Amino acid sequence: MKSYLQSGVLVFCLLAAAQVQPAKAQAQAPPAPASTSQPTPSTPAQPPATPGSAAPTPAPTSTSDQTPSTPSPLKKPAPYNDGVDTGDGFSVEARFFGYPQGHPILRGGQADDTNAIGDYVFPGWPQYGLGGVVSVPAGPGAELRVYGFQMKSSGSALLGVDHNFFTIDFPAGSAVESRYATQDLKIAYEYTTYPITQRLRFKTLYEIQYVHIVPDIWIPASFAAGSSSAVDTLPSARHIIYPSFGVELEHSVSKHLRLTAKSSGFAFPHRAVVWDADVNAAVRIGQAELVAGAMAYHFKTSPLNAYYVRETITSLYVGFRWYLFK
């Protein structure tokens, strides 16, 4: 009995061991390879190549000691800085014209039907003239300026023949007195069209001009030939309102010295004419500028009227300019 029990226990143990061994072998066996292999993290996946295209090359691995492949761009030279010496900025300038040269000339026009001599050269030169300039910035490279001046003169002359001025008869031998005032107002838009160099600039000028002249001729009572009463023409003003166009060269010799030359004008055939020219040098000291220059100015009112006036003025001038903001 005891032998049978021992034999049964031995058989049971052998059967249990046979069942555990296959299960353990199945658990330790590697898994079967999949039909499609998955890329490992260390090998990046490459897109499939299409027909006719080259296979992509892998990106190079960056290292800490690698230098940039593109060189740094060259630095451009800094533009020349004139400060306020370019003439830009809010400023006010006063000008004094010393001993201008020029005589207004009165002529009979096409509408004159008196058949009398109406030509007269006003005697005397203006002893001086006053003017000014106001400048306002109008954008990059542009300036809006308002120019103005006034000149006056008076004199006397002796008429050799009979004259008729403004429908008033002046007999020969009369000593006449005359005076006149010439005024000009100009609004100019000055634009830097082309900077030739950093210091030399070419500008174009677009302007509107207003010229106003008041001539007056009379005979005092004590000098009237054959008459005890005075003769006066009663001054009648003439004026011109014109656009004008011009050019300007501006050269900054140094930070404190600027040279300028400009000219502009406009005319219609057999109508009014106006032109002017100006050259000057400006020396800047802080917010102030001392200006010295020369000008020429010419105008002629329309000859279609009963009379017209023409004049050419030349003068030296000095000016003091103050910039409101440095």
Image (cartoon, helix red, strand yellow):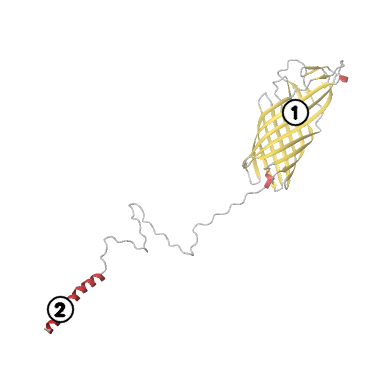
Residue 121 at x, y percent in the picture: 79, 25
| 43 versus 100 height, above or below | below
- Amino acid, disc 2: Val
Q: Residues within 10 Å of mark 1 (few under 14, many from 20)?
A: some
**Image quarter hosting the N terminus:** bottom left
| 169 versus 309 height, above or below | above
* SS under mark 1: strand
| CA distance separating discs 2 and 1 | 147 Å
Q: How many marks?
A: 2
**Residue on which disc 1 sits:** 311
Determine the residue positioned at 16% across, 80% down: 9
Q: How crowded is mark 2: few (under 14 residues within 10 Å), some or many (20 or more)?
A: few
**Label drawn at residue 223:** none
Residue 123 position by quadrant: top right
**Residue on which disc 2 sits:** 11
Q: Residue furthest right?
A: 222
**CB under 8 Å between discs 2 and 1:** no
Determine the residue positioned at 70% across, 41% down: 91
Residue 241 at x, y percent in the picture: 68, 28
In this picture, residue 67 sits left or right of residue 114: left
- Amino acid, disc 1: Glu
Q: Pick whichever, 127 or 249, lies toward us.
A: 127
Determine the residue positioned at 74% across, 45% down: 288
Q: Pick whichever, 296 or 321, lies toward us.
A: 321
